[in-house]
Image (cartoon, rainbow, N blue to C red):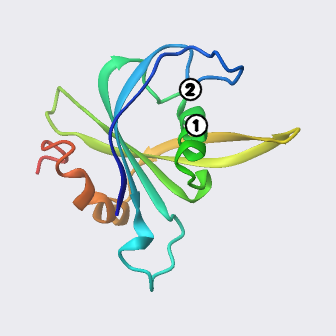
Amino acid sequence: MILYDGIYEWDGKSTDGNQPICWWPGSYRMRIIDLSSDNPKIIYLKLYAVILKNRGRGTSLKNYIHNFARVISEEFNIDIEKTLWSEIISNPLSGVDELIVANIRSASHVSDKKLFSALWREARPNELELLSPWITDMDLNLFGL
């Protein structure tokens, strides 16, 4: 079940005292999927999937995914560590796009806040299979299909 499907933008400013996603504006196509709703008998390690596609307007989330994930998980009430965070990356040279995944883990606690670290990697075949029904219309050039 799709929980959100649209454009997510931020202006890079903070008026409420909280750290913004990034100090520069950005814009992404974002789709949030509840993976467990289609098969309630299956127990998933990752309950949700967030699929991102940069719109080419503003900064990339490559170095700010942990801040973005924190904001999105609070806004949509999803568990940051039980979510598969992925991004479709365009490769204009080959014309074939790829899917990368961020492993986001709790790194430490400061006061009542958790700090997270993130490492990007290529999507595994099982992740590609799981997400393929949800990404085909986000980018028709994905994986040369």
User: Which quarter of the image is occupied by the N terminus?
Assistant: bottom left
Q: Residue at x 25, y 32 (%)?
A: 90
Q: Residue furthest bottom?
A: 41
Instruction: Residue 140: name its quadrant.
Output: top left
Q: Residue at x 35, y 31 (%)?
A: 28
Q: Amino acid at mark 2?
A: Ile
Return the residue nearer the eye: 42 or 76.
Answer: 76
For marks 2 and 1, give the CA distance. Answer: 7 Å
Contact, mark 2 vs mark 1 (Cβ under 8 Å): yes
Task: Name the residue tied to disc 2.
Answer: 21
Mark 2 lies on a secondary structure that is loop
- Count of numbered tags: 2
* Crowd class of label 2 (few under 14; some 14 to 19; many from 20; radius 10 Å): many
Q: Residue at x 56, y 54 (%)?
A: 78
Mark 1 lies on a secondary structure that is helix
Q: Earlier in the sequence, mark 2 or mark 1?
A: 2
Task: Name the residue tied to disc 1.
Answer: 71
Q: Amino acid at mark 1?
A: Val
Q: Which mark is residue 144?
A: none
Q: Position of residue 109 (x, y in %)?
A: 83, 42
Tell whether 107 sits left or right of 103: right
Return the residue nearer the eye: 9 or 102.
Answer: 9
Q: Position of residue 14 (x, y in %)?
A: 62, 16
The answer to whether 143 is drawn above or below residue 71 in the figure is below
The answer to whether 76 is drawn above or below residue 19 in the figure is below
Q: Position of residue 127 (x, y in %)?
A: 37, 61
The answer to whether 34 is drawn above or below residue 144 in the figure is below
* Crowd class of label 1 (few under 14; some 14 to 19; many from 20; radius 10 Å): some
Q: Residue furthest right?
A: 111
